[in-house]
Image (spheres, helix red, strand yellow):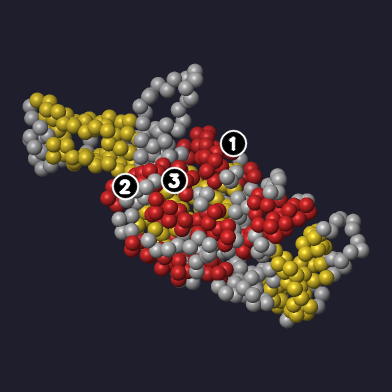
Amino acid sequence: MPEIAFDRFYRYAKLTELLHALAREHPDLVAIESIGRSFEGRDIWVLTVTRKATGAAADKPAFWVDGNIHATEVAGSTAALFFLHTLLTRDGSDSEVTRALDTRAFYVCPRINPDGAEWALVDQPKWVRSSTRPYPFDEDEPDGLVVEDIDGNGRILQMRIADPNGLWKAHPQEPRLLVRREPTETGGTYYHVLPEGHYDGYDGHTLKIKRPRERLDLNRNFPGSWRQEFEQKGAGPYPTSEPEIRAVADFVVRHPNLTGGTSFHTWSGVLLRPFEHAPDEEMDAEDLWFYQRAGRKGTELTGYPAISVYHEFRYHPKEVIGGTSDWIYEHLGMFSWVVEIWSPMREAGIANYKYIDWFRDHSIDDDLTLFRWNEEKLDGAAHHGWKAFDHPQLGRVEIGGWDRFNAFSNPPPSRLRAEVERFPRWILWQALCSPRLELVHAAAVAAGDGTWKITLVVENTGWLPTYVTKRALARKTVRGVIVDFELPEGAHLVAGKLRDDTGQLEGKAYKHTGVSFWPDYEVTDCRRKLEWVVQGNRGDVIGIRAHHDRAGAVRTLVTLG
Ligand SMILES: [Zn+2]
């Protein structure tokens, strides 16, 4: 097993090497493939993980895991790597991991966006939201600040410039910490604050951040509730216009055995579920019940709250967004989640921290709490003292303040492992909830005149129904259990069908509790019995294959006589 470090982030070449080493050293469990190339031509890797000895991945219900669609959210890759590490190091010693590898498959894409991540991880980093493809225009805006590490220390911090009309001032109890001034306040020392960077076309008076040339947001490029740029920034010219998203969408639809997925992002310390564009009232009740149950389990196992994007995670109350998870649930009817890794606010002990709303407004006491947590628990890694710097365009400025990339956008290296350790149990729980087709009984009984009656019983042993969601039924993205009957030469069918769609099998998810006024009339609606009558010879072998796109496949041979 190659050594994987969980206190650092891997650049593309090293990550590629590591993923190939995992496949090489676990040929019984891991296969690696490139699902396509990024804008800059990097392969996008997906690892298929399952015990090959117990069946091919395509014949098992599967779960999708991805990370790092957003350029700087590199801890998403770490979380995916840690999940792989858990599967491969706990196999055989951990009953849940072993059972998951025996009965399910995992498709893991640790880095959907290798180009953007590479820009964030080079020695002189440059931040883009997502893809590095210029969009919507090839040309730069003529003037403004370009965010980058300008003093060459490998970090992108903040720059402050003293100005009587600045918004920012020193915190009354902590001069290194900048906070917003009060609405009617005058007479102090105030600053304008900008990200670190160089300035093109400075006019000596006005300051603005240049919008980056690379304005795509790959997570807005999925087909689910896709909207044009004017409604949704970074959406791209049309759904799946970008090679990274086309590759992922194509892989997902080519794997109908997928039943759910989790996408790792940063940050906020929260588990996000659909809808992103509509209230819970519009979701099928059963789907919502399972989402709520999986959310409670997620909170129990990860410590993160679980919420609907639409209801509690909107950048602006009048705007809605869409992404991977909305597409996977909305169009395909699979349960999908987004994990926003890491919450410095919660770590610092800020009470009533409410995700995005906190950024819009909060008390300056919270800023001080965060600052002190940084001093006491992170050795000051999240905030740097202000140092004078002769800026090539702006003149005398000071560089310092919060280190967004290393302490907020991602957990700092000292906290990275503890943070990504939260998730494997929850992913395993979700995967093990999936439907799973199993063989109960198969037999041939002589029925006179050279005929035999063949009986097959299959059942869904999973928690969820074979169709997974009501959404999938409504959107007609699933078919039932397909049964194929193969006769040897010379034999023929008297009754029954050679191929039949035998419908869906229920699971256990929506049965009533013990104290219920409504009994479940169909106690074994997870089970199906099928019969055929065959004219044939003693010793003939009949092949039967039952498979459900989402619940897996079973095969059996029945001998006449
Ligand atoms: Zn993100």
Mark in front: 3 vs 2:
3
Q: Pointer 3: what residue?
A: 428
The residue at 73%/53% (across/down) is 369
Q: Quadrant of residue 444?
A: top left
What secondary structure is found at the residue carrying circle 2? helix
Ligand 1 under 8 Å from disc 1 Cβ:
no
| Image coords of residue 128 (percent x, y) | 60, 67
The residue at 37%/61% (across/down) is 1
Identify which amino acid the numbered label 3 is placed on. Answer: Leu
Of labels 1 and 2, earlier in sequence is 2
- Side (left or right) of 155 relative to 488: right
Q: Real-space Cα distance between discs 1 and 2? A: 35 Å
| Image coords of residue 297 (percent x, y) | 52, 40
From the viewer's perspective, is residue 509 above or below residue 91?
Answer: above
Cβ atoms under marks 1 and 3 closer than 8 Å: no
Residue 281: image tag: 1
Q: Is residue 222 visible?
A: no
Q: How crowded is mark 2: few (under 14 residues within 10 Å), some or many (20 or more)?
A: many
Identify which amino acid the numbered label 1 is placed on. Answer: Glu
Q: Pointer 2: what residue?
A: 59
Q: How many labels does the image show?
A: 3
- Side (left or right) of 173 relative to 103: right
Q: Quadrant of residue 136?
A: bottom right
